[in-house]
Each structure stands twice: as C-alpha cells, then as structure tokens.
Image: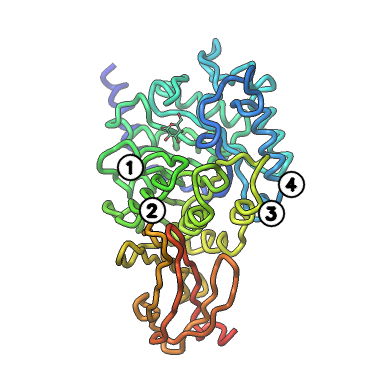
Amino acid sequence: MFGQQLCLVTLLLSVATVFSLDNGLALTPPMGWLSWERFRCNTDCVNDPDNCISERLFMQMADHMASDGYKDVGYEYINIDDCWMSKERDENGRLQADPKRFPSGIKKLADYIHSKGLKLGIYEDFGTKTCGGFPGSKFYMSIDAQTFADWGVDFLKLDGCYSNTDDMTVGYPLMGFFLNHTGRPFLYSCSWPAYVGKPDYQSIAKHCNIWRNYKDVQDSWDSVSGIIKYYGDDAQKFAEIARPGQFNDPDMLIVGDFGLSEDQQRVQMGMWAIMTAPLIMSVDLRNVKPFAKQLLTNKRIIAVNQDPMGIQGRRIWQVSNVDYWMKPIQPNGSYAFAFINFNTNGVQKKINLSLNYLHLTDPAGYNITETFTGKFLGVYKPTAYLHTLVNPTGIFMATAVPLSVYGRY
Ligand code: GAL
C-alpha cells in the first residue's frame, strides 16, 4: 500500500517537474471567440432562446465567424465557457452536455465547427465544481481529458473555483499531461495564476499555452483600464515570460459590446495587440456595429499582435496620466508603440516628443506609420519630434521601422 502511494507521489512530482506541455500550439497569441463575458451563464432557453448557452448559439457564432470576415483575418477558436454541462456525470463518470440545450451533443457540435474550418474550445474546472456550480474535474482529470479528445475538442480552459490552490502546482501540469496523453493537440488555457498569490510563472509557462492572471474583464472602461494598469505595473514580472507557445491572458475583448466608447474600444484592441494577448472576442457576432467589426478585423493591429517573435509589449513611461508602451516587432529593430491618455478632463492631450524618448535611436531614422488607419506619417530621425493629439481615454498607435531595413518608404 505504502509502495503504491510512493509510486503515485513520484508520478505526480515528475509530471510537475519533468513533463512539459510543448504541444507546438499558440506560436502566436490564439484568436477566437468565448461565450462568457457576453452571454454568461444564461441557461434559460425557454424564455431567451437566442442568448442562452446552447449548441444553437455556438453554431450561429461559428457561421458568422466563418462568413463575416473574422476567420479570414485569423480568428479560429469558438470556445464554450461555463454552464454547458448537465449537473450529473453519466453512469461511467463521463461529463455530458445539458441534453436540452445541447441535444446533438458536443461531438456533433465539434464536427459542425470543424466543417467551417474552425476549432472548438471547452471549459472545465480544476476543483470539485466549476465556478457556475457544474461538475468539476477533481478526481476525474484523466477521464475528462479523454472525453474531450473523443469529442474532437481542440482547446481547454481550466478554471480554478472550488479547489485547494496548494494542489495547483501539481494538478495543472497533470491535466496537461493527460491532455497530451490523448494524442490530440489541445491548446491549454490555465486560470492557475489568477488563483494563487505568488504564481511560479516559469512553471506555469512550461505547462500552459496561455494563462489568466488577473480579474475577469467586465463591460466597462474601469475594468479595461484596470487590466492595462496591472499589465503595465507588471509587479510580478510576467511580461518577460511571454513567447511563442506561452502567453499571458488579460481576458476577453469586449469590443462591440455595450460599455466602451469608440475611443475606449480602440484602446482595448490596440493594447491587446501591444500586450501580445490572446484575441478572444466576447461579442454577439450576429449583431456587431460596423465600427467594432472594422476594429476587430483591422489587419494592421492584428499583425502587431501576431508578430512572430511573440514579445509582450511593456509600459516604458507614465507621465501626466499618459502611458507610453513599446513592443518589439519584426523586421529587426522595429517597434509598435502606443500612447494612451487616461485623463478624463475632456481635452485632447498634446504629445510632443522626440523618438529618443522611446529609445528609437537608429541614426538613419524610422518610417513611422499610424496603425489604425495605415497612414504613413513620415521619416523621423531619433532627434525629430513627433506631434500627436490623443483623445481622452483614447490611444495613438504607430509602428517604427528603421530605414536601415527597407530604406525610405
Ligand atoms: C470565472 C472565470 C471567468 C468565467 C467564469 C465562469 O472564474 O474567470 O472567465 O470562466 O468563471 O463561471
């Protein structure tokens, strides 16, 4: 008996220390859609059939993702969040989708989503229950990983409610091990750091493709600006961990929902690109205003986010309530940079600074292009001054490509 227990402990410890996820996925931040922020735990399909968590909702989102231009610019995953399950496991201990809301079952849904050239993500929890109170994976990890693989799922978000956070160091890697063991590639999204006081980011990055590490995004400027501040402060030094295959996740894009002004939506989209964040929309794709749709599908912003080096941008200055952020991008020596005006006094902020201040010091100078519109602003030497006006709770974003790479545009 003691021998068996010792074996188990050795297995668990070796999974946590020796095993690494290394699944070749998320070489750039994943792009997709997730139900939570916009549709929450709405299970009332009788009174609210259009907005409840049901197979119909995910099929409709897949239709719009595939045919309205989102897929063409890189959005790929249709992800189910909490509240998809039946309250009980089946007689073999397997999870089952709520039979009323998902009458065809998850496998059929996965087939449908794959037929559109998209991928399916699902949600579970590390503890005894999901945050919404549905069956958790504790004691069932291996069987759940196999169930998801059998269904053809491509992405797992593993939340951390109703759990003992001390178990996460071993438990999150263990789920990754079981996922790998199925032989099916799973993009693995861990909520692990969001639940522990001092996350061990080295270990988290070894075992997860992406990880939530801060509060849930809500449909408000307070929430979005709070997340940007947390990422700018980077008190736990998580920015340096990001690279291809492993990214910090500041949570979903709420562009196109109710709470942000147009300027604030531009801030979220631009900053999620600079922060090298997963671009996971949570919006009703059946009904997106033209402004938001254009923003969500802006190829120049997406290119900054998807830069192959996968380096997370950093805040380099904070002056008079204005943030200055920089992200290295290709070609070599280039940067995307952004100024965000957090002032709410109703006047545009005049910014007037030489490129030197942004550490853009190549003496040959830089081609500067505004990112939202693609407007070429000119060639600037390091000592030249860039003048811009930034709206209250707005953003200016541009790229700087050294002349030494292409010469003058
Ligand atoms: C939270 C999580 C959210 C969402 C929700 C579901 O803990 O951070 O993103 O998944 O649970 O109940």
Residue at figure coordinates x 59%, y 64% from the top left? 300
Q: What is the tally of numbered marks visible in this picture? A: 4
Q: Residue furthest front?
A: 346
Which kind of residue does numbered mark 4 sit on? Ser
Residue, x 33% and y 46% (percent of image)? 203
Q: Residue 314: image x %, image y %?
A: 37, 62
Q: Is residue 242 above or below residue 170?
A: below
Mark 3–mark 2 distance (CA, rounded to whole Å): 28 Å
Residue 78 spot, x, y in % from top left: 61, 39
Q: Is mark 4 within 8 Å of ligand 1?
A: no
Dot 3 or dot 2: first in sequence order is 3
Which label's residue is closer to the chain start, 1 or 2? Answer: 1
Quarter, ligand 1: top left
**Cβ at disc 3 under 8 Å from ligand 1:** no
- Decide which of 260, 155 is in the foreground and name it: 260
Q: Between 356 and 201, which is closer to the camera in this rendering?
A: 356
Give me the C-alpha separation between circle 4 and circle 3. 9 Å
Q: Which of the two labelled residues, at mark 4 and mark 2, occupies the earlier sequence position?
A: 4
Q: Earlier in the sequence, mark 1 or mark 3?
A: 1
Q: CA distance from mark 1 to mark 3?
A: 39 Å
Q: Secondary structure at mark 1?
A: helix
Q: Residues within 10 Å of mark 3 (few under 14, many from 20)?
A: few
Give the class, few, some or many, for how many residues have Cα within 10 Å of label 4's Cα (few <14, many ≥20). few
Q: Position of residue 27 (x, y in %)?
A: 52, 55
Residue indicated by mark 4: 67
Residue positioned 46% across, 46% down in the render:
209
Q: Tag 3 or tag 4, which sits nearer the N-term?
A: 4
- The quadrant of the picture occupied by the C terminus is bottom right
Residue type highlighted by circle 3: Asp
Discs 3, 2 touching: Cβ within 8 Å: no
Residue 345 appears anywhere in the view: yes
